[in-house]
Image (tube, grey):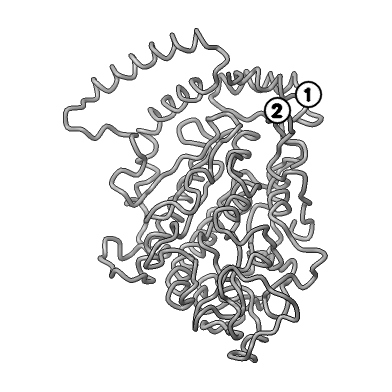
Amino acid sequence: MFPSRREFLQQNAWGFGTLALSSLLMQEDADAASGQSGVLASPHHPPKAKRVIQLFMSGAASPIDMFDHKPFLDKHHGEESDFGEHVEAFQNGLGPWMRSPFPFRPYGKSGKMLSDVVAPLGACVDDMAFVHNMVGKSGVHSQATYLQATGFDTPGYPGMGAWISYGLGSLNDNLPAFVVLPDHRGFASNGPKNWSSAFLPASTQGTAIFPQRANPIEDLMPSSSFTTKAGDAASMRLLERINGQYQSQRPGDSRLEARIRSYELAAKMQLSAPQALDISDEPQHILKMYGLDRMGSEYPAEINAPEEIEYFGRKCLIARRLIERGVRFIQIWSGNDNGFPRRNWDSHEDIRRDHGPLATGMAVGTAALIQDLKQRGLLDDTIILWTTEFGRMPSTQGNVGRDHNPYVFTNWLCGGGIKPGVTHGQSDQWGYKPLDRDHPTQVYDIHATMLHLLGINHEKLTVRHNGIDRRLTDVHGHVIRELLA
């Protein structure tokens, strides 16, 4: 049987570091009255950020074709690849060296080299901090995606947004604390398990919203013609009575309480969510900035830039509207699970064909998001994290594709206390492994840094599960001080 929220706190008191359990229980009582759910009575230290927007490129985006310029590949393009050591490829990606099909140019005062397909980011590159020496643990999509999304490479662990929602609670009482905006074509590898609550209270899991669909939130609104508002209200009253009877007989089962809270939140969302998702009141110049001045166009079957611009840009604009309304953590996905023709970043066959449209769509929407948040004063306390599950090889697969490369890839961050216009960590001359192999950056370090900026000591927010004190960063992680403003 699942413990109640109060019992959950009492049973896991050791998971809150130096925070007094009495303070947590007092906060629990206050949260219960206000509808909030955070277990931290107060942050461990003064926060610089309140919220997070995570941009996840599903399928493994290639940093050496967007952000991590490699003159070596330009010079030695077409020559036999020689890494100077044994290389374990995922498939057969050890062909000749291959330069990026996209030219690179310097941008901003920092002179950061970006490829042409992400040129829109040049307008805000001086706000961004790049980490080019990220390493993973697996070249398998599902495991690597779990690692970036949950801190573990196996299923059964809470998503990063769930941990943050659990620790800090919500900033609003009529929308979820954790919202997920999947790719419009479907879920990425692992699907909803990437934003599961796992062993945390069920109320912390992410809520998936498809803003481009006629019914963006599944089952939120009654869709049948025979349903009336009065009938819907009567159904809710009946559910409330039945649930109350069930809960009184099983006071230790948190699943029902979470379900009741979700229905209560759904009732509030019936009023607030349509308003947040309706972009018709946005000025024309804002819509154009996000690439939404051609909405409703018909697109070809082949992957193409205008389609990617519209759908990714819409999610970025919705994300801005959601954080304005107090959503704590938003996850935006680009790319769905494997299929043919490609609709994700897994460019085994053709980097130009796949990365070109996807990167352009991502860059237009992301640049607009950064600039829009900045002009509204929201970037100062909002962290934006761009990530993917691993990188791609500097040698070719086939003629113009790239194989998986879990040995080095790129993350970048901006806003929310991140030092702007810097690069932390470099990859080697090929973009195959970190330049300093003894000191790579791991996802635990990124997670620890983000929690730090949110006011959380990543070692102190823990929950005992199956006899082990679990946390987002497992037993690893260091705050990257060089990234802090």
Which mark, residue 124? none
Residue 243's place in the image compared with 413, above or below, is above
Q: Nearer the viewer, mark 1 or mark 2?
A: 1
Front-most of residues 332 and 384: 332
Give the amino acid at mark 1.
Ala
Left or right of residue 254: residue 228 = left
Relative depth, front residue between 41 and 143? 143
- Residue occupying image coordinates x 41% and y 45%: 209
Q: Is residue 377 among the parts visible in the rendering? A: no
Q: Secondary structure at mark 1?
A: loop
User: Where is residue 252, by image quadrant?
Assistant: top right
Q: Vertically, is 477 above or below 88?
A: above
Q: Nearer the viewer, residue 238 or 321?
A: 238
- Identify which amino acid the numbered label 2 is placed on: Ala
Residue 212 lies, in percent from the top left, at: 34, 52
Residue 244, relative to residue 311: is it above or below?
above
Cα separation, mark 1 vs mark 2, equals 9 Å
Find residue 50 and report its horizontal and vertical position in percent: 62, 43
Q: Is residue 318 visible?
A: yes
Q: Earlier in the sequence, mark 1 or mark 2?
A: 1
Which mark, by number, is residue 20? Answer: 1
Would you name the residue on which mark 2 appears?
Answer: 41
The image shows a total of numbered marks equal to: 2
